[in-house]
Amino acid sequence: MMSTSPRIVVVGPCASGKSTLVARLREHGHDAHAVAQEHSAVKDLWQRRSPDVLIALDVSLDVVRQRRSPDWLESVYERQYERLAAAYAAADMVIDSAAYDADQVLAMVEAFLADLS
């Protein structure tokens, strides 16, 4: 059984919506933190935040290019996913953030958290 305020860590590649989700979770009173695992060769960087819940956001290269730059390099995208591999394997929940809007992603996470309590 989770405490009423689990520590939530959110990981994902650039432009997946980490900052948006964390800001929305915090607005709703959650202890949420984004970890830039995609930029670190330290495979367990996300663990240093001691999460109770690990949420991984997923997004396609096409969507990254729409959100960031049409010239976003595939090699950068692939490197980020390599750096995220351990976090994805350990994630409590993986969400394709391109398939849902910010409200839907928030609702999915909050429903998941409610099921934990």
Image (cartoon, rainbow, N blue to C red):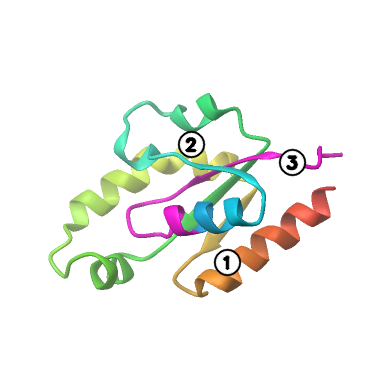
Q: Nearer the viewer, residue 50 or 86?
A: 50
The span from disc 3 to disc 1 (Cα, nearest Å) is 19 Å
The span from disc 2 to disc 1 (Cα, nearest Å) is 22 Å
Can you identify the residue that label 3 sits on?
A: 5
Can you identify the residue that label 2 sits on?
A: 86
Q: Position of residue 25 (x, y in %)?
A: 60, 54
Above or below for 39 versus 67: above
**Amino acid at dot 2:** Ala
Give whichever of discs 2 and 1 has the lower sequence position: 2
Secondary element at image label 3: loop
Task: Count how many numbered circles sit on residues in the image.
Answer: 3
Asked if marks 2 and 3 touch (Cβ < 8 Å), the reply is no
Q: Position of residue 55 (x, y in %)?
A: 57, 49
Secondary element at image label 2: helix
Measuring 17% from the left and 61% from the top, which residue is drawn there?
72
**Amino acid at dot 3:** Ser
Q: Position of residue 54 (x, y in %)?
A: 60, 43
Give whichever of discs 2 and 3 has the lower sequence position: 3
Residue 15: say if magenta: yes
Measuring 28% from the left and 50% from the top, which residue is drawn there?
78
Q: Local crowd at mark 2 within 10 Å, few (<14), some, or many (≥20)?
A: some
Q: Which mark is residue 47?
A: none
Can you identify the residue that label 1 sits on?
A: 105
Q: Which residues are magenta?
A: 1-20
- The label nearer to you, 2 versus 3, is 3
Secondary element at image label 1: helix
